Image (tube, grey):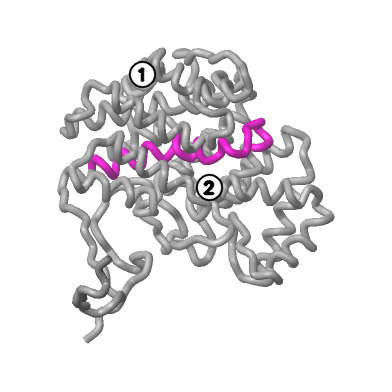
Amino acid sequence: MSEEVKKGLMGIVVDETTISQVMPEINSLTYRGYKVQDLCEKCSFEEVAYLVLNGELPKSKELKKFITEERKNRGLSKQILSDIKNMPKKAHPMDVVRTAVSLMGLEDKDTKNNSPKANMKKAMRIFAQTPTAVAAYFRARKGKKFIQPNKKLSYSENFFNMMFGKVPNKEIVKAFDVSMILYAEHSFNVSTFTARTITSSLSDIHGAITGAIASLKGPLHGGANEAVMYMFKQIKKPEKAEKWINNALDKKKVVMGFGHRVYRSGDSRVPTMKKYFLRVAELKKNTAYPKMYKILEKIMLQRKNIHPNVDYPCGPTYHLMGIDTDFFTPIFVMARITGWSAHIIEQHAANKLIRPLSKYKGSEHREVLSLNIR
């Protein structure tokens, strides 16, 4: 009897996890059992990062220690900063951040140590240093001087300061924090599964996260938030949105920012991110993007019955914050490092080499004849 091939491992349960799950019965993505919508409204990104990595929301002393640890590890060596400065100015920022994390592994004193304690320390260093690497390249590409991390600022405040030399108002920072919380973790998505697969060979955390970043770069995964913004820029005006989307659908083009492998009745993260997108648009006095957003969303539902995913509101939100479009996915990386790290640690705890089978469809057994040899 022929074995059924499950392309893309669709419907295949490959392992167990305690980190996150989508719960259709409450229409929510949950982290360690908590609804992500509630976490967005009631917690800072640092609190959620602690939760994802440690399994519980932090008590006051635990949070203070976590924040102190993150802030003291933000700095990059002069060598890595020099390497980032000298990287090609036309390189995609995802390639730069992927390389930067790999370079961090060359310098980390615990690179070869896969113990839970060492992996947690390395996870914190990667978590703290990656925004510094992203901001360093953001400024280097523009010919601007690097801004050192500021230990007095929160994770998100510090990132804005390293990028732009100033911290925006609290509502902008909150919207950014929310996007980071929503991007922090999402079960066995393709980049997380990549990280777990690499980890299953007993490779190190820097290598696993480097592989995950490469996976996240693809437009069918993390790169979708960039693609959404390129779409908005191509449409230009709300008045052109209806014609553009109908034309795209008539030509059977893929419209990025819509649909999801897990959600069938709508991404549970979207209402929260949409709320903050609209607030940022209001603060920035932008009416065009909300109108465009509404038109595209409406027609996709009418014609294809496809709902937006979280990348759809995130793209224009980051743009309104002044962030270059090709830096959207590196920000996704900054958030998802928490989820990847938690999965890497979980994989090590009960490891089994991930080695699926394939169904051979090539030529039948053949003999090498002398006339084939030259």
- Residue 163 x, y percent position in the rendering: 57, 22
In this rendering, the label closer to the viewer, 1 or 2? 2
Residue farthest toward the right in the current orientation of the protein: 239
Disc 1 designates what residue?
73
What residue do we see at 40% from left, 24% from top?
129
**Relative vertical location of residue 27 with respect to residue 165 in this rendering, above or below:** below
For label 1, the SS is: loop
What residue do we see at 38% from left, 49% from top?
191
Crowdedness near tag 1: few (<14), some (14–19) or many (≥20) residues, C-alpha within 10 Å = some
**Relative vertical location of residue 374 with respect to residue 365 in this rendering, above or below:** above
Q: Write down the quadrant of residue 344 in the picture.
A: top left
**Relative vertical location of residue 129 with respect to residue 263 in this rendering, above or below:** above
Is residue 100 visible to us here?
Answer: yes
Is residue 41 visible to us here?
Answer: no
What residue do we see at 25% from left, 75% from top?
371
- Residue 30 x, y percent position in the rendering: 39, 50
For label 2, the SS is: loop
Q: Is residue 340 magenta?
A: yes
| Badge 1 or badge 2: first in the primary sequence | 1
Comparing 210 with 35, the one in front is 210
- Image side of residue 174 versus residue 75, left or right: right
Amino acid carrying mark 1 in the image: Asn
Main SS, magenta residues: helix
- Residue 349 x, y percent position in the rendering: 16, 44
Comparing 220 with 318, the one in front is 220
What residue do we see at 41% from left, 44% from top?
214
Residue farthest toward the bottom in the current orientation of the protein: 1
Amino acid carrying mark 2 in the image: Gly
Disc 2 designates what residue?
223
Magenta-highlighted residues: 319-345
- Residue 55 x, y percent position in the rendering: 28, 40
**Relative vertical location of residue 87 with respect to residue 279 in this rendering, above or below:** above
